[in-house]
Amino acid sequence: MVPLSYYLLLSGFLFACGVAGFLIKRNIITIFMSIELMLNGVNLSFVAFAARWHALSGHIFVFFVMLVAAAEAAVGLAIIIAVYRTRETLDVDRMNLLKL
Amino acid sequence: MLSVHLILFLLFGAVCVAGAINLLLQRHPINSALSLIVVMAALAGEYLLLGAEFVAAVQVIVYAGAIMVLFVFVIMLLNAGVEERSAGSRVSWLLGIPGLLTGSLLVAWVLLRQSGTFMLKAGEQPGAPKDIGQLLFHQFLLPFEVTSILILIAVLGAVALATKPEKTAEGAD
């Protein structure tokens, strides 16, 4: 028997790590990975609450979050490749102009 | 009392926490990507403990498999090196980090105060693929089809963005 709050604490910790990575990391790929970490933390709380309320729709929602994350990763990484082609850098500090 | 469920939860949770912290500490993106894979695999264990078999399988196949392969592939394609440490933005240090700390400490305080109000058994809500499929193709049919269109658009967008623009540039010239 594990209290529900333990699962929520773990999920909150993962989300906080994702936010911290988003704020302190300078590499655009690592920042993107921090976003995936946040999504994973949210997924854990979805599954935990699905167990709490005995509702299967929580699992379905996790499935949809994963699909959206896959679409986001595909488009986001393509954008990173396109940016790298023009800027030749992955450092977000150097990506400060909209126009080349 | 330490039950097997609690021991397994703590084991997978410790791996999750260690992987997440390692992701923040590593300076090379490939090390961060590998620790993110560790976090995702350990999360699949947590899902199994909660009874979500289908979600655990999809987590390993889609997240730890497909998405992270994409990440590792892009890191190697772009030959990403060690990231440079810079001061970062002043707003993120003055507002972001303190705000994050206050927010997470508040949430942790609330959760720990309510600790023990509801105990989850191992496999509390079984999510077998059959039940998920029943729900997905009856109640959630429209969102499911809409997501398939979203994936299609994302694939087309990724191809359009990642192709070399040289030919079109020469054509425009």
Image: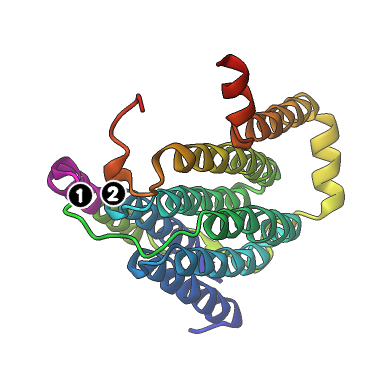
Q: Nearer the viewer, residue A94 or B69?
A: A94
Residue at (86, 40) in percent of width and height: B134
Q: Nearer the viewer, residue A82 or A45?
A: A82
Question: x%, y% of residue A79?
Answer: 52, 36
For residue B12, above or below residue B90: below
Q: Are marks 2 and 1 in contact (CB under 8 Å)?
A: yes
- For the C terminus of chain B, the image quarter is top right
Is residue B96 found inside the magenta-colored segment of the image? yes
Tell me if B145 is positioned left or right of B106 in this view.
Answer: right
Distance CA(mark 2)–CA(mark 1) = 8 Å
Residue placed under numbered mark 1 in the picture: B88
Q: Residue at the top extreme?
A: B172
Prevalent SS, magenta region: helix
For residue B75, above or below residue B96: below
Range shown magenta = B88-103
Q: Secondary structure at mark 2?
A: helix
Image disc number at residue A23: 2
